[in-house]
Image (cartoon, grey):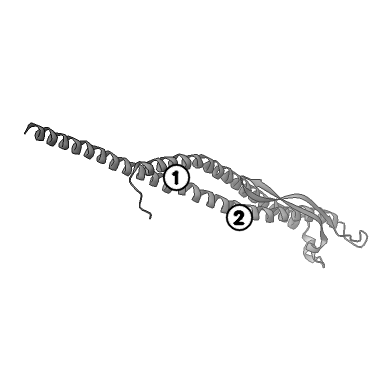
């Protein structure tokens, strides 16, 4: 680490550093709190989405047991007509968010298909919508975790490294300057005494 010059110029610089660093700390702390709140919100939304999906699966197994004998691929009945994902800026972090979603059931013959297909179609629309939201929420959570980690590291750097180091340098410089001042006073007194004695001779 670079050796600090123990003089008044460095003391002024270190004082300025502490003031500048202390301005960053509240802003970083606020950013971290906002990211933590958004992360908690995303986690809650993911949990709720998982519970909704479980409830839908349970509803399908209870109300549509005949689905087990369905010859086609159920997941191929859904047609994702439109999905728009935009970026939302949260304290400098860009997070994905679904702004437009249009789902439809692919056309099927009403006459050649069992009556329960209509109910299944509704449940498929709901579950697909939740699954797509879950994918975006997982990505959102991943970005929020990185954002919280990065902001916490920066906050700790200022709060636990840079500020204490600058304050330590300030104390060290003040002690040295104070010692030098005392030494100068003592030297001055000794020189004065010598001059006085020399004048008396």
What is the x, y in percent for residue 137?
A: 66, 52
Q: Give the residue displayed 78% in from the left and 54% down from the top.
A: 83
* Dot 2 and dot 1 residues touching (CB under 8 Å): no
Residue 78 seen by the camera: yes
Most foreground residue, 69 or 79: 79
Mark 2 or mark 1, whichever is nearer to me: 1
Q: Does 58 sit above or below residue 178?
A: below
Mark pair 2, 1: CA separation: 26 Å
Check disc 1 and report the residue beneath it: 159
Q: Quadrant of residue 191?
A: top left
What is the x, y in percent for residue 147?
A: 57, 51
* Mark 1 neighbour class, 10 Å CA radius: few under 14, some 14 to 19, many 20 or more: some
Q: Quadrant of residue 186?
A: top left
Q: Tell me the quarter of the image containing the N terminus.
A: bottom left
Most foreground residue, 4 or 187: 187
Secondary-structure class at tag 2 = helix
Q: Tell me if 140 is positioned left or right of 13 in this view.
A: right
* Mark 2 neighbour class, 10 Å CA radius: few under 14, some 14 to 19, many 20 or more: some
Looking at the image, the residue that sits furthest to the right is 111
What is the x, y in percent for residue 143?
A: 61, 53
* Of callouts 2 and 1, the N-terminal one: 2
Residue 142: image tag: 2
Secondary-structure class at tag 1 = helix
């Amino acid at each position: 680490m670079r050796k600090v010059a123990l003089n008044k110029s460095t003391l002024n610089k270190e004082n300025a550093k502490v003031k500048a660093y202390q301005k960053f700390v509240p802003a970083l702390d606020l950013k971290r709190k906002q990211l933590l709140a958004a992360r908690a919100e995303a986690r809650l939304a993911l949990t709720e989405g998982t519970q909704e999906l479980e409830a839908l699966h349970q509803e399908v197994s209870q109300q549509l047991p005949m689905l087990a004998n369905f010859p086609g691929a159920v997941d191929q009945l859904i047609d994702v007509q439109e999905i728009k994902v935009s970026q939302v800026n949260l304290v400098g972090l860009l997070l994905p968010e679904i702004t437009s979603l249009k789902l439809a059931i692919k056309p099927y013959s009403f006459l050649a298909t069992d009556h329960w297909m209509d109910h299944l179609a509704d449940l498929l629309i709901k579950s697909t919508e939740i699954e797509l939201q879950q994918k975006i929420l997982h990505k959102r959570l991943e970005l929020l975790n990185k954002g919280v980690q990065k902001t916490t590291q920066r906050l700790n750097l200022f709060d636990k490294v840079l500020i204490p180091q600058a304050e330590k340098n300030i104390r060290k410089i003040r002690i040295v300057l104070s010692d030098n001042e005392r030494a100068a006073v003592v030297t001055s007194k000794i020189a004065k005494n010598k001059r006085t004695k020399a004048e008396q001779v």
